[in-house]
Image: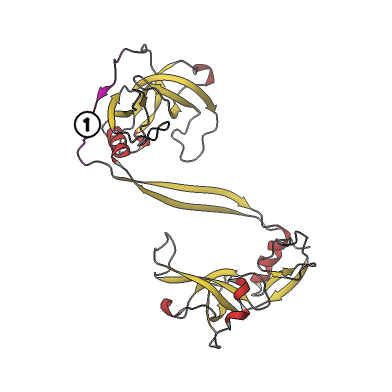
Amino acid sequence: MPDILSAPLVVEFPFTRSLGPVQSAFLTGLRERTVLGVRTGDGKVLVPPVEYDPVTAEELHELVEVAATGTVTTWAWNPHPRRDQPLDTPFAWVLVRLDGADTALVHVLDAPGPEAVSTGMRVRVRWAQDRTGAITDIACFEPYGSEPGETGEPAPHDGEFTEPVTGIVTPARLDYTYTPGRAQSSYLEALEDRRVVGERCPSCRKVYVPPRGACPTCGVATDERVEVGPRGTVTTYCVVNIKAKNLDIEVPYVYAHIALDGADLALHARIGGIPYDQVRMGLRVEPVWTEGSRHPDHYRPTGEPDADYDAYKELV
């Protein structure tokens, strides 16, 4: 029985989106210390503003300015802040209905402890010192001793600002510990010896690479190890034209599904050693290892004749 492997894994990518006129005005307003909402057809003011009425789906565009003070409608205490959260000291997650708004905004409240937080308490915005046009321009909320209604009704706003924010980039990140299990641990250990090992289903006799520990078709456990490849056939592929962050590979390049000889499941890998526009279905390839690597760096053409379509059509 091989040792079960375990390793930290980080999945991270930036999510980029453009903004319409409503969201652009809202975020640009935050940069200018102005909180904007949008008025619906029945007179309600939504903060944060949305582009379409959530009830009627009517397009919304009537912007209004609301106060930077409000009332906590509900809350939850966070005793252990995590990386990249708004505050690095314990704080409360709060829903705040700003004066003049009919909906609540989720943010954080800077308070000395949970005993200092209550539903119905009055709070105000603490603005960030450096503002760029993002929700983080509100650094947090803080307790405030005003009474509701002191700031009056929301005022109409044209949403016009100098140098409006037209797009945002939101980093998405997931940190977790990956434990591949018995079958994939054996697969990864074999790769260290530059071998590719799958597992055969005792019922349908298909060989799965990478192995999953069970047959996805029959649902029975697999434990018979089978060495496959190392050569294989390109079953399908795509041309990548967008360069990934921190990946030192020039675009365009090809990523392909490769059916290794003796396997009944195609794995995916990069194709190198051939111009991207010459990669094709049926191309015969072999792995290329780099010094110290635990897995193939890429696959390259073997020089063999292309495989007949009938030989791999079930794996496309």
Residue 253 placed where, x, y %? 43, 71
Camera-side residue: 226 or 65? 65
| Secondary element at tag 1 | loop
Magenta highlight range: 149-163
Q: Is residue 156 left or right of residue 254?
A: left
Q: Quadrant of residue 197?
A: bottom right
Residue 32 placed where, x, y %? 26, 32
**Who's the residue at 22% across and 31% down the image?**
158
**Who's the residue at 45% across and 33% down the image?**
87
What is the magenta segment's predominant secondary structure?
A: loop
Camera-side residue: 263 or 308? 308
Residue 213 placed where, x, y %? 73, 61
Residue at image mark 1: 158
Q: Quadrant of residue 246?
A: bottom left
**Who's the residue at 53% across and 26% down the image?**
76
Q: Quadrant of the C terminus?
A: bottom right
**Who's the residue at 53% across and 72% down the image?**
236
Q: Looking at the picture, which amino acid does disc 1 mark?
A: Asp
Q: Is residue 20 left or right of residue 120?
A: left
Camera-side residue: 205 or 113? 205
Please say whether residue 151 is one of the residues in the magenta stretch. Answer: yes
Outermost residue toward the left in this view: 162
